[in-house]
Image (cartoon, grey):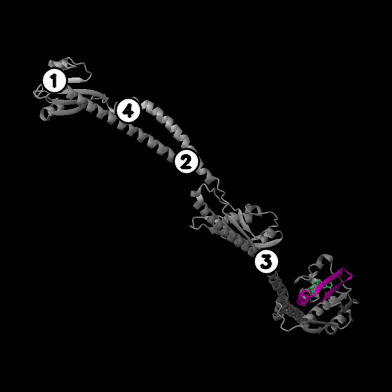
Amino acid sequence: MKRKIFRGIFLTALLALITGLALVMGVVYNYYDRQMLEETWDKADYLAQGVERLGADYLAALHVEDRITFVDVDGTVLFDNQAQADGMENHGDREEIREALETGSGSSERTSRTLSEKTVYCALRLSDGRVLRVAYSQYTVLHLFWVTVLPVAGIAAVILLVTWLIAARIAKHTVQPINEINLADPDIDERYEELAPLVRRMKKQNRRIEEHMKELRRQQEEFQTVSDYMQEGLLLVNQKAEILSYNRCIREFFENEEELLGRSALLLNRSEIFREVMSGVLEGKHYTEILPLKGRTYELIANPVAEENGSGVRGAIVLLVDVTEREEREQMRREFTSNVSHELKTPLTSIYGMSDLMRNGLVKPEDIPGFASDIYKEAERMIRLVSDIMKLSKLEEQEQDAEPKPVDLFALAEEVKQELSYLAKEKEINLYLTGEHCTINGNENVLFELLYNLCDNGIRYNRPGGNVRISIEPEGERVRLTVADNGIGIPREHQGRVFERFYRVDKSHSSKMGGTGLGLSIVKHAAAYHHADVQLKSEENMGTTIIITF
Ligand code: ADP
């Protein structure tokens, strides 16, 4: 703007200077020209009168600077004060002479070949018909221009320099108040009233910007709050993979406490998969990948954000979903299916093999009862297994039909003791029940299964003459069930895993005992169903105690 003002002032001054000079020169030259012409006519008039009275000799006696020519009626030059008359050619065809002969007076002008001088002729016809001509020479405008060009240029240069300085000063002073306006809080000196509308508009604009900013801040906060409540990690990056926005989960998942805005997302995780996803998504590809992170498993979903005109990618939205539980469940389901198949296949193969031998008559008649007994045992094991699986899946799905109702745990334990008395006798184990009648709210069948499995294990993983002690006791508001045996115990390294499905410390021993590997799993789920705590204490060869607190 400063430059524009300066240029405007300077060019105007320059134009004014040139036009002014040209006009002044033209006016002066014109005035001078007219003056000279008038003077020449006066001279011609005055000389004509002299010749009329005194004859042509009068001319010869004169001493004048102007050129005087006396021409006869036929154009013959009779006298010329600056040349020899008889040597001169006929002047009858000269414009001014011709005009004077015809009308009484005539004038014309002729420019020299160099264009620097012009001669003006004024001719008058005398009473006898002859013509007197007076001529004067003067410089042309062009000559005047060339003669004056240097001093005029000097003056013009001085004027231009002064104009330059003044224009620069004016431009600076004009722009200064505008430059001094405080954009955040625009106000203006009263002296510059022309700027008042601009300032008013700026204030209005500022108010509008402020309102927009407030709205944007509100939206930003709203977005941040919403995204912070998300269970997923949310990350927005620009096309250079710089972080534009992120939520609380991103920090938690990547265990990063630093401020992440503006930093490269690639620094969050150095794994190859993360890098590949980040660079690929910014090339416009979609990704759904599994990303292991600090012991947990995440699903990494990355979507590119296209430019509005669709010409490229302006950034990406990355979502991180914690799928650890889902993956674990999936893994467990896979293991469970494979375990079930395996567990079912073993007795089925035996049954198949033995029945095949019998079918083909390869078994001696006296061995048939033994074979039949084995087939019976294997089938029984299969039934137990299927039944355990069904119980477990019911417990897992939490789909117990019956409404919880008060159950006397002591009475239930008596029932279990009764049920297992045959097995205990067979294994030479002493079963004891102590404590008192305690009632809890729950599902009787599930509690029966829990008690049964604990006591069953106590009997089976024991030695002849061993004991299994069941006790039911109140513990403040709660009820404590303890099943303790002095059997073979569980080695320390296996204690953490015995509640897993199909986990057995000694597989062959467990199978021999008719175990399915699901007993303690059922116990765990049954306890969870009743919101009870499970505690296991065991020592190899000393015995096992399991405490369930309802
Ligand atoms: P199983 O049907 O094989 O008994 P469980 O889930 O009931 O399966 O038990 C898992 C494993 O834990 C058993 O195979 C056994 O090795 C061990 N176990 C369970 N209870 C006892 C116990 N009272 N004494 C010693 N070992 C036990």
Type of amino acid under label 4: Phe
Ligand 1 within 8 Å, label 3 CB: no
Please name which of the two marks, 3 or 2, marks the residue nearer to the observer: 2
Please give the range of residues in magenta.
522-550
Give the crowd class for mark 3: few <14, some 14-19, many >=20 residues within 10 Å.
some
The spot of residue 13 in percent (x, y) is 41, 37
Q: Is residue 322 visible?
A: no
Q: Distance of mark 4 from mark 2, alpha carbons?
A: 33 Å
Residue 145 tag number? 4
Residue at label 1? 51
Q: Amino acid at mark 3?
A: Glu
Residue drawn where x is 12% and y is 20% of the image: 53
Amino acid type, residue under disc 1 in the picture: Val
Indicate yes or no whether the magenta region holds residue 31. Answer: no
Residue 3 bears which disc, if any?
A: 2
* Residue 479, image quadrant: bottom right
Mark 3–mark 2 distance (CA, rounded to whole Å) = 70 Å
Q: Which residue is mark 3?
A: 327
Q: Residue at x 35, y 32 (%)?
A: 21
Q: Earlier in the sequence, mark 3 or mark 2?
A: 2
- Mark 2 C-beta to ligand 1 under 8 Å: no
Which of the 4 quarters of the picture holds residue 521? bottom right
Kindly report the distance in space between the C-alpha atoms of the residues bearing marks 4 and 3: 101 Å
Q: What's the CA distance linking mark 1 and mark 3?
A: 138 Å
What numbered label is drawn on residue 243? Answer: none
Please state which of the two labelled residues, at mark 4 or mark 2, is closer to the viewer: 4
